[in-house]
Image (cartoon, grey):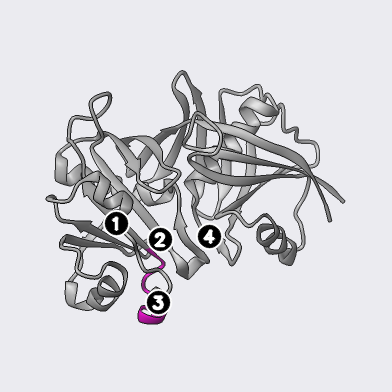
Amino acid sequence: MQLPVFVVDAFSREAFRGNPAAVCLLEADLDEEMYQKIAREMNHSETAFIRKLQPTDSFTQSSRFGLRWFTPATEVPLCGHATLASSAILFHKIKNVNQTVTFETLSGELKARQAADGIIMDLPLYLTHPKDVKEVQDLIKVALGNVQVQDIHYSPDTKNLLVRINDSYGRSFLESLEVNTRNMTEVENSGKVKGLMLTLKGEGSGKPHGYDFYSRYFAPWLGVAEDPVTGSAHAVLSSYWSQQLGKKEMWAFQCSRRGGELKVSLRDGGRLDITGQAALVLEGTLSI
């Protein structure tokens, strides 16, 4: 069997920045084991599989598809950057004729639409709750050492732990911070935490003068030591920072080595729009 496959750098206008995702186009479902084998072979933080829902559907003409995401280790319920990458392939490479496409996913229906400044994804917004530092102090100590922490929140829906470092630190500190991911899974093995978000208040003025908040994201529990730019994490971060800053429109920057920027807009009904750019860097065929 021959499968079209692409590699897309999401949340970036140029190649070799942002977050790379592999995207496979499927005429029909694969054997369950094959999804994971392909994701392991591609070895990106996520591999996305866009699937026709009916044999008569067309990648060019249809407006509704199935979408699944796999890390090299497991399937995940939501991945923002791989959704952006998938939408970019449909809109820009396959030339899908629709302004908006809908994906059926483990997180419900997700929409992506074309806009002048990129692709806008409609994602769920996840609330956070304050977390007692005593419950996670061992994890924070292992990951961050003696870095001063200002606030800790937790998202039960995503099992992400949000750790806001002290406002006295700046962007350059967060970018250069050495985070110990090797021992995280040993210290936290209860299954309650699947991702660690480090975040820092930005300049507070938004684009073009600066960013509202910064972050880095670590998920060794899912086989991803550090994810370069994480859309699903911003479905949590946006909820937290909206309350902290009193804003519904924000610009964010994820301070990984590759780096990437996101425009986030909170909407009524517990939804979030995330706008991003994407760059196609590779296309080919998988033989399975």
The answer to the question of whether label 2 and label 4 lie on touching residues, with beta carbons closer than 8 A, is no
Tell me the CA gap for discs 1 and 3.
17 Å
Label 2 element class: strand
Residue 101 at x, y percent in the picture: 58, 32
* Magenta stretch holds residue 152: no
Which sits earlier in the primary sequence, circle 1 or circle 3? 3
What residue type is disc 3 on? Answer: Asn
Horizontal side, residue 16 vs residue 237: left or right: right
- The secondary structure making up most of the magenta span is loop
Q: Which residues are magenta?
A: 185-195
Foreground label between 2 and 3? 3
Q: Which residue is mark 3?
A: 183
Label 3 element class: loop
Does residue 213 appear in this view? yes
Q: Quadrant of the C terminus?
A: bottom right
Q: Which residue is mark 4?
A: 76
Residue at image location 34% in from the left, 64% down from the top: 179
Q: Which residue is mark 1?
A: 198
The answer to the question of whether label 1 and label 2 lie on touching residues, with beta carbons closer than 8 A, is yes
Q: Which residue is mark 2?
A: 218
What residue type is disc 1 on? Answer: Leu
Residue 104 at x, y percent in the picture: 58, 46
Residue 16 at x, y percent in the picture: 54, 39
Label 1 element class: strand
Which sits earlier in the primary sequence, circle 1 or circle 2? 1
Foreground label between 1 and 3? 3
Foreground label between 1 and 4? 1
Residue at image location 65% in from the left, 32% down from the top: 90
